[in-house]
Image (cartoon, rainbow, N blue to C red):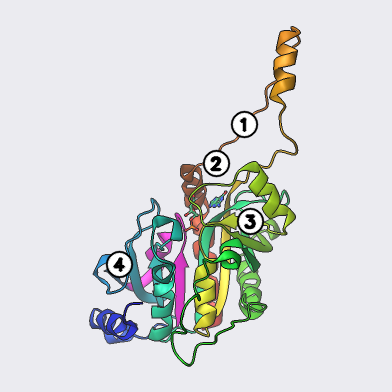
Amino acid sequence: MADLTATTDFIRSQLPSELQHPRIGIVCGSGLSGLAAVIHNIQKIPYESIPGFGTSTVQGHHSELAFGLLGKNNVPVVVMLGRFHFYEGHPISTVVYPIRVMAKLGVKEVIITNAAGSLNPDIPVGTIVVVHDHLALPNLVGTNPLLGPLLSPNHRRFLPLSDAYSSSLRRLVFRAAHQLSLEKSALAEGTYAWVCGPTYESPAEGRFLRHAGADVVGMSTVPEVVAARDEGMEVMVLSLVTNFVVIPPSYWSIREEVEAELAGKPVVLPTSQIVSHEEVLAIGKEKAEVMKSLVQGVVELLA
Ligand SMILES: O=P(O)(O)O[C@@H]1C[C@H](O)[C@@H](CO)O1
Ligand SMILES: Nc1nc2[nH]cnc2c(=O)[nH]1
C-alpha cells in the first residue's frame, strides 16, 4: 500500500487551512457527482496527481477528490467525485485507499452512495435504499480488502461486521427525508449485494442473490464499507435503484416455441429487458437532486 502520510501531506499542501480537516467523507456513485454543485469553497484535486490513487475510468465517474463546506452549517467535507471499482483492474487495496486517506485526514463518518439494480419487486426504480446490511460473495471467497498483513497493530485481525451500517446515521436519513417532505415511497431499507462486475447479473444469478436475501445489487461500496469500519469510522450507505435486475419467473422454452411454429400455432414471444450503463446514468441524473438534498440534509443534522 502507498504511504498514507505522504498522501495526506500532499493533499493538505493543496488546500487552504479551513479545508484541511474534513469532518465527513462522502463517496459519489455512478452519475451522482452533482453534489459538487452545492459545496461551497470547493477545491478539487485530480486523482492522478494524488500519490497512491488510481484513475477512475468509468463513464459517469469524475476522477477528483473535492474538499469544501457543505450545508447551512458549513461542515468541512471531503468528497470522492467518482470511485475505483475492482472490475476496472485496480488492486482491492487501491479501491479502498481513498477511504483510508479520509480516516487519516480525521474523518469520523462516511456517507457512501451508489447506483444499484433492484432484486426486490417492492423496491422500484428511482427508490433510494438505506442499506442496513450486505451480502458480499467476493468477501466470502477471497477478494476481501482486509486480506494480508495487518496495516498496523491498531487494526483488528478479525473485524466484526454485524454493526457495519450505523443505526444512528440511518435514523438521520429518515429525519432528513421528513424535513425535505419526501414521500414515504422515496426511501426503502434493504440489503446490498456486492458482485465484482463488470457483467450485469444473469437471470439465475439475480434469482440466487434474491433468494439469498439481497434487495439490491451493485459493483462497489462493500470494500469501502469494510475499510471504513477497519479504520473505526461510522458508515451510511444510500443506493439509488436505477434498474430492475431481470429475473424471469421461469425460462422461456425454445423447444415449445419451435414445436408451436412447426404446428402452425401462434407464437407469443416474451418481451426482453436488457440493462445498460446508459440507463443507470439516466436514472442517476433524474434522481440526482433528491440524493443531493438527502446527503446535504444528513450532513446538516450530523454536525
Ligand atoms: O459506482 P457505482 O456502484 O455507483 O456504479 C454502478 C456499478 C457499476 O460501476 C455501474 C454499472 O452500471 O454502476
Ligand atoms: N451488479 C449490478 N450493478 C448495477 N449497478 C446499477 N445497476 C446494476 C445492476 O443491475 N447490477
Looking at marks 3 and 1 on the same chain, the residue that comes earlier in the sequence is marked by 3
For disc 4, the neighbor class at 10 Å (few under 14, some 14 to 19, many from 20) is many
The verdict on residue 30 being magenta is yes
Would you place residue 77 above or below residue 192 in this image?
below
Residue 47's tag is 4
Looking at marks 3 and 2 on the same chain, the residue that comes earlier in the sequence is marked by 3
Is residue 72 something that shows in the picture? no
Amino acid type assigned to the residue bearing label 4 in the image: Tyr
Which residue is under mark 3? 216
Residue 272's tag is 1
Give the quarter of the image for residue 48: bottom left
Q: Residue at x 44, y 67 (%)?
A: 92
Residue 275's tag is 2
Looking at marks 4 and 3 on the same chain, the residue that comes earlier in the sequence is marked by 4
Q: Which residues are magenta?
A: 23-41
Q: Residue at x 61, y 43 (%)?
A: 202
Q: CA distance from mark 3 to mark 1?
A: 20 Å
Marks 2,1: beta carbons within 8 A:
no
